Image: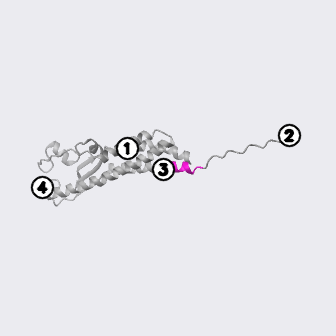
Amino acid sequence: MATVQRSMWSKLGKYISAVVIACFFLPFFGISCDGMDVITISGTDMVGGCKPGGLITAADEEGKMQGGSIEAKIDDVDVEPFAVAALALVVIMFSLSFLGTRSAMRATLIVAVLASGALAALYVEMRGEMIEAVEKEATSMEKGPMTRDAKVSAGGRFGLWIAGLGLLSVIGLTASALLSKQRAAPEVTPPPEPIPPVV
């Protein structure tokens, strides 16, 4: 059973880790207005301090929006330490997935747990900041994509959720393999054959 679990991790671990890394290029957070994302922030945006995506950013680049002209200045995203830590840990996890040793699997489990914690802390921090920004903007803007009558929501996006599920899968696979190894029955050496008596 332990051999099967370790074989499963060696086959799937590197691919799951690669998917988690790719998720950092997808939207992690966003602010939507009437079901349309006006601002989207990817994991790499928070790591590199890049400009976010979304309708408002497109309007800032084009200088116009549908329904009229609007001046929208979008600042770059602040570098988030939790996002930097999460990406660094995921890269380490990806490197460890190429090693088949038990110590590497144990290290992978620890790194995956730490990365999950960093993503959870990032979610709490960013969601609070976005909700505060939406409430502040709603009281000061009378026109634009986010009006008083518009339904505005802020929260996580699919990139964050897929990355979280990937990390949970890594934790489950490595923990299962390690536990199976511990529970495996030790090999019993057969007793030596008795020496026949000398006649």
What type is the residue that disc 3 sits on?
Answer: Ala
- Report which residue position mark 2 lands on: 198
Tell me if residue 111 is in the magenta stretch: no
- Report which residue position mark 3 lands on: 175
The magenta span reads: 178-184
Q: How many marks?
A: 4
Q: 110 and 21: which one is in front?
A: 110
Element type where label 4 sits in the image: loop
Image depth: mark 1 or mark 4 in front: 1
Q: 166 and 174: which one is in front?
A: 174
Q: Earlier in the sequence, mark 4 or mark 3?
A: 4
Answer whether labels 3 and 2 touch (C-beta < 8 Å): no
Q: Few, some or many C-alpha atoms within 10 Å of disc 1 (few <14, some 14-19, many ≥20)?
A: many
Q: Few, some or many C-alpha atoms within 10 Å of disc 2 (few <14, some 14-19, many ≥20)?
A: few
What type is the residue that disc 4 sits on?
Answer: Lys
Which residue is located at x 76 percent, y 43 percent?
193
What type is the residue that disc 2 sits on?
Answer: Val
- Report which residue position mark 1 lands on: 89
Horizontal and vertical percent position of residue 68: 11, 50
> Where residue 143 is drawn, which disc sits there?
4
